[in-house]
Protein backbone atom coordinates (compact mmCIF):
# COMPACT_ATOMS: atom_id res chain seq x y z
CA UNK A 1 0.00 0.00 0.00
CA UNK A 2 1.24 3.47 -0.86
CA UNK A 3 2.11 5.70 2.08
CA UNK A 4 1.25 9.24 1.08
CA UNK A 5 3.55 12.18 1.83
CA UNK A 6 0.96 13.44 4.32
CA UNK A 7 0.89 10.08 6.12
CA UNK A 8 4.67 10.04 6.30
CA UNK A 9 4.74 13.61 7.58
CA UNK A 10 2.25 12.59 10.28
CA UNK A 11 5.04 10.53 11.86
CA UNK A 12 7.08 13.65 12.62
CA UNK A 13 7.85 13.87 16.33
CA UNK A 14 6.09 10.59 17.02
CA UNK A 15 6.91 7.20 18.50
CA UNK A 16 7.39 4.11 16.35
CA UNK A 17 7.32 0.83 18.26
CA UNK A 18 9.36 -2.18 17.18
CA UNK A 19 7.61 -5.43 18.09
CA UNK A 20 10.07 -8.29 17.72
CA UNK A 21 10.91 -11.46 19.62
CA UNK A 22 13.92 -13.70 19.18
CA UNK A 23 13.71 -17.26 17.79
CA UNK A 24 12.89 -19.78 20.49
CA UNK A 25 11.08 -17.31 22.74
CA UNK A 26 7.45 -17.94 23.80
CA UNK A 27 6.31 -14.71 22.10
CA UNK A 28 7.96 -15.59 18.77
CA UNK A 29 4.72 -16.05 16.83
CA UNK A 30 3.19 -13.67 14.25
CA UNK A 31 -0.11 -13.64 16.13
CA UNK A 32 1.51 -12.57 19.38
CA UNK A 33 3.62 -9.89 17.70
CA UNK A 34 0.54 -8.50 16.00
CA UNK A 35 -1.23 -8.35 19.37
CA UNK A 36 1.76 -6.59 20.91
CA UNK A 37 1.73 -4.15 18.00
CA UNK A 38 -1.98 -3.45 18.46
CA UNK A 39 -1.41 -2.83 22.16
CA UNK A 40 1.39 -0.38 21.33
CA UNK A 41 -0.93 1.52 19.01
CA UNK A 42 -3.45 1.87 21.83
CA UNK A 43 -0.63 3.40 23.88
CA UNK A 44 0.16 5.97 21.21
CA UNK A 45 2.50 4.36 18.68
CA UNK A 46 2.18 6.15 15.35
CA UNK A 47 3.74 3.28 13.39
CA UNK A 48 4.95 -0.26 13.99
CA UNK A 49 8.17 -2.04 12.98
CA UNK A 50 8.11 -5.86 12.74
CA UNK A 51 10.39 -8.62 11.51
CA UNK A 52 9.39 -11.48 9.25
CA UNK A 53 6.96 -11.97 6.39
CA UNK A 54 4.18 -13.48 8.49
CA UNK A 55 4.62 -10.80 11.17
CA UNK A 56 4.15 -8.11 8.52
CA UNK A 57 1.00 -9.80 7.23
CA UNK A 58 -0.56 -10.36 10.65
CA UNK A 59 0.35 -6.88 11.87
CA UNK A 60 -1.11 -5.23 8.78
CA UNK A 61 -4.41 -6.91 9.68
CA UNK A 62 -4.16 -5.90 13.34
CA UNK A 63 -3.34 -2.18 13.10
CA UNK A 64 -4.29 0.80 10.97
CA UNK A 65 -1.01 2.67 11.32
CA UNK A 66 1.95 2.39 8.91
CA UNK A 67 3.93 -0.84 9.18
CA UNK A 68 7.69 -0.92 8.72
CA UNK A 69 8.75 -4.43 7.76
CA UNK A 70 12.07 -6.20 7.61
CA UNK A 71 13.44 -9.71 7.23
CA UNK A 72 16.43 -10.74 9.31
CA UNK A 73 18.45 -13.50 7.68
CA UNK A 74 21.47 -14.45 9.77
CA UNK A 75 23.09 -12.71 12.73
CA UNK A 76 26.25 -11.02 11.45
CA UNK A 77 27.29 -8.70 8.65
CA UNK A 78 24.51 -7.61 6.32
CA UNK A 79 21.49 -9.49 7.67
CA UNK A 80 18.66 -6.95 7.94
CA UNK A 81 16.70 -7.49 4.71
CA UNK A 82 20.04 -8.28 3.04
CA UNK A 83 19.03 -8.77 -0.59
CA UNK A 84 16.57 -7.47 -3.16
CA UNK A 85 14.68 -10.78 -2.87
CA UNK A 86 14.18 -10.21 0.86
CA UNK A 87 13.18 -6.59 0.33
CA UNK A 88 10.58 -7.35 -2.34
CA UNK A 89 9.12 -10.16 -0.23
CA UNK A 90 8.65 -7.74 2.66
CA UNK A 91 7.07 -5.17 0.36
CA UNK A 92 4.71 -7.69 -1.20
CA UNK A 93 3.72 -8.92 2.28
CA UNK A 94 2.17 -5.51 2.81
CA UNK A 95 4.79 -3.36 4.50
CA UNK A 96 4.31 0.35 3.88
CA UNK A 97 8.03 0.82 4.47
CA UNK A 98 10.76 -1.76 3.89
CA UNK A 99 13.66 -1.45 6.35
CA UNK A 100 16.95 -2.81 5.07
CA UNK A 101 20.66 -2.67 5.79
CA UNK A 102 21.69 0.79 4.64
CA UNK A 103 25.41 0.52 5.29
CA UNK A 104 28.08 0.76 2.62
CA UNK A 105 29.03 -2.89 3.08
CA UNK A 106 28.78 -5.41 0.23
CA UNK A 107 25.36 -7.02 -0.04
CA UNK A 108 25.02 -10.82 -0.36
CA UNK A 109 23.39 -10.67 -3.81
CA UNK A 110 26.03 -8.36 -5.23
CA UNK A 111 23.59 -5.54 -5.89
CA UNK A 112 24.31 -2.03 -4.68
CA UNK A 113 22.09 -0.29 -2.17
CA UNK A 114 20.86 2.00 -4.93
CA UNK A 115 19.96 -0.92 -7.19
CA UNK A 116 18.06 -2.57 -4.34
CA UNK A 117 16.13 0.58 -3.52
CA UNK A 118 15.30 1.14 -7.18
CA UNK A 119 13.91 -2.40 -7.45
CA UNK A 120 11.67 -1.90 -4.41
CA UNK A 121 10.38 1.38 -5.81
CA UNK A 122 9.85 -0.09 -9.28
CA UNK A 123 8.13 -3.30 -8.25
CA UNK A 124 6.08 -2.20 -5.23
CA UNK A 125 4.46 0.82 -3.62
CA UNK A 126 6.66 0.57 -0.52
CA UNK A 127 9.03 3.21 0.73
CA UNK A 128 12.52 2.26 1.89
CA UNK A 129 14.12 2.93 5.28
CA UNK A 130 17.90 2.52 5.28
CA UNK A 131 19.27 1.26 8.60
CA UNK A 132 22.62 3.05 8.88
CA UNK A 133 25.64 2.88 11.14
CA UNK A 134 27.42 6.16 10.40
CA UNK A 135 27.09 9.61 8.91
CA UNK A 136 28.69 8.34 5.72
CA UNK A 137 26.09 5.57 5.52
CA UNK A 138 23.26 8.05 5.92
CA UNK A 139 24.61 10.38 3.24
CA UNK A 140 25.14 7.48 0.85
CA UNK A 141 21.70 6.01 1.53
CA UNK A 142 19.94 9.31 0.92
CA UNK A 143 21.84 9.71 -2.34
CA UNK A 144 20.93 6.13 -3.27
CA UNK A 145 17.24 6.97 -3.04
CA UNK A 146 16.22 5.87 0.46
CA UNK A 147 13.01 7.51 1.66
CA UNK A 148 14.09 7.49 5.31
CA UNK A 149 17.39 6.85 7.09
CA UNK A 150 17.75 5.41 10.59
CA UNK A 151 20.55 5.04 13.13
CA UNK A 152 19.63 1.41 13.75
CA UNK A 153 23.11 0.04 13.10
CA UNK A 154 25.12 2.66 14.99
CA UNK A 155 27.60 0.70 17.10
CA UNK A 156 26.99 -2.53 15.20
CA UNK A 157 28.61 -2.00 11.79
CA UNK A 158 32.16 -1.42 13.00
CA UNK A 159 32.36 2.28 12.19
CA UNK A 160 31.29 3.73 15.53
CA UNK A 161 31.63 2.61 19.15
CA UNK A 162 28.54 1.15 20.78
CA UNK A 163 27.17 3.80 23.11
CA UNK A 164 25.33 2.87 26.29
CA UNK A 165 22.21 4.67 25.12
CA UNK A 166 21.25 6.14 21.76
CA UNK A 167 24.08 7.58 19.67
CA UNK A 168 23.03 11.20 20.08
CA UNK A 169 26.29 12.44 18.57
CA UNK A 170 25.56 10.58 15.34
CA UNK A 171 21.97 11.80 15.30
CA UNK A 172 23.12 15.40 15.65
CA UNK A 173 25.73 14.96 12.92
CA UNK A 174 23.23 13.51 10.45
CA UNK A 175 20.67 16.16 11.32
CA UNK A 176 23.30 18.88 10.76
CA UNK A 177 24.08 17.43 7.33
CA UNK A 178 20.66 18.60 6.18
CA UNK A 179 19.43 15.43 4.48
CA UNK A 180 16.33 15.78 2.36
CA UNK A 181 14.77 12.65 3.90
CA UNK A 182 13.48 11.96 7.43
CA UNK A 183 15.99 10.85 10.06
CA UNK A 184 14.72 8.12 12.39
CA UNK A 185 16.41 7.48 15.72
CA UNK A 186 16.69 3.82 16.61
CA UNK A 187 18.89 1.73 18.85
CA UNK A 188 19.31 1.45 22.63
CA UNK A 189 16.56 3.95 23.47
CA UNK A 190 15.41 2.59 26.81
CA UNK A 191 13.70 5.48 28.59
CA UNK A 192 11.25 8.28 27.77
CA UNK A 193 14.03 10.77 28.55
CA UNK A 194 16.32 9.14 25.99
CA UNK A 195 13.54 9.19 23.41
CA UNK A 196 13.02 12.89 24.02
CA UNK A 197 16.78 13.50 23.79
CA UNK A 198 16.87 11.71 20.43
CA UNK A 199 14.11 13.96 19.13
CA UNK A 200 15.90 17.02 20.45
CA UNK A 201 19.10 15.89 18.71
CA UNK A 202 17.34 16.19 15.38
CA UNK A 203 15.39 12.99 14.82
CA UNK A 204 12.22 13.12 12.75
CA UNK A 205 10.75 10.17 14.67
CA UNK A 206 11.93 7.72 17.32
CA UNK A 207 11.83 3.92 17.31
CA UNK A 208 11.69 2.08 20.64
CA UNK A 209 11.67 -1.70 20.73
CA UNK A 210 13.18 -3.67 23.60
CA UNK A 211 12.12 -1.28 26.37
CA UNK A 212 8.46 -1.61 25.33
CA UNK A 213 8.00 -5.00 23.70
CA UNK A 214 10.61 -7.41 25.07
CA UNK A 215 9.54 -8.68 28.52
CA UNK A 216 12.57 -10.96 29.00
CA UNK A 217 15.01 -8.09 28.72
CA UNK A 218 12.92 -5.67 30.78
CA UNK A 219 12.54 -8.27 33.52
CA UNK A 220 16.30 -8.81 33.43
CA UNK A 221 16.92 -5.12 34.04
CA UNK A 222 14.78 -5.18 37.19
CA UNK A 223 16.19 -8.50 38.38
CA UNK A 224 19.77 -7.26 37.96
CA UNK A 225 18.97 -4.09 39.93
CA UNK A 226 17.56 -6.08 42.84
CA UNK A 227 20.45 -8.50 42.90
Image (spheres, rainbow, N blue to C red):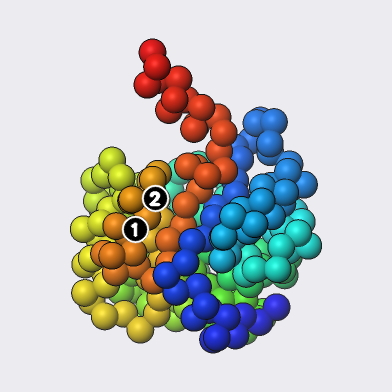
The number of numbered discs placed on residues in the rendered structure image is 2
Is residue 136 at all visible to an observer of this figure? no
On the picture, is 10 further left or further right than 71? left
Seen in the picture, residue 144 relative to 151 is either above or below; the reply is: below
Mark 1, secondary structure of its residue: helix
Seen in the picture, residue 166 relative to 227 is either above or below; the reply is: below
Cα separation between marks 1 and 2: 6 Å
Quarter of the figure that contains the N terminus: bottom right
Q: Residue at x 56, y 76 (%)?
A: 127
On the picture, is 26 further left or further right than 141? right
Q: Residue at x 35, y 84 (%)?
A: 180
Residue 14 is tagged as none
Quarter of the figure that contains the C terminus: top left
Question: x, y (%) of residue 142?
Answer: 38, 77
Q: Are marks 1 and 2 in contact (CB under 8 Å)?
A: yes
Q: Quadrant of residue 71?
A: bottom right
Q: Residue at x 57, y 33 (%)?
A: 215
Q: Residue at x 52, y 78 (%)?
A: 10
**Front residue of this view, candidates 187 and 10:** 10
Q: Residues within 10 Å of mark 1 (few under 14, many from 20)?
A: some
Question: x, y (%) of residue 226?
Answer: 40, 17
Q: Residues within 10 Å of mark 2 (few under 14, many from 20)?
A: few
On the picture, is 45 further left or further right than 56? left
> Mark 2 — residue?
192
**Front residue of this view, candidates 57 and 116:** 57
Question: x, y (%) of residue 85?
Answer: 64, 64
**Front residue of this view, candidates 14 and 95:** 14
Residue 196 is tagged as 1
Mark 2, secondary structure of its residue: helix
Is residue 39 at all visible to an observer of this figure? yes
Amino acid sequence: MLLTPAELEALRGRLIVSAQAYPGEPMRTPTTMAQVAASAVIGGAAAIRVQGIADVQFTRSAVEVPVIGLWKDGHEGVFITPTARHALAVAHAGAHIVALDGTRRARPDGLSLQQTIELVHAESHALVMADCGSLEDALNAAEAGADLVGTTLAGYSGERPKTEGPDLELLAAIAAAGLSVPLVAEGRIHTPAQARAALDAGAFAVVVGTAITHPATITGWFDAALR
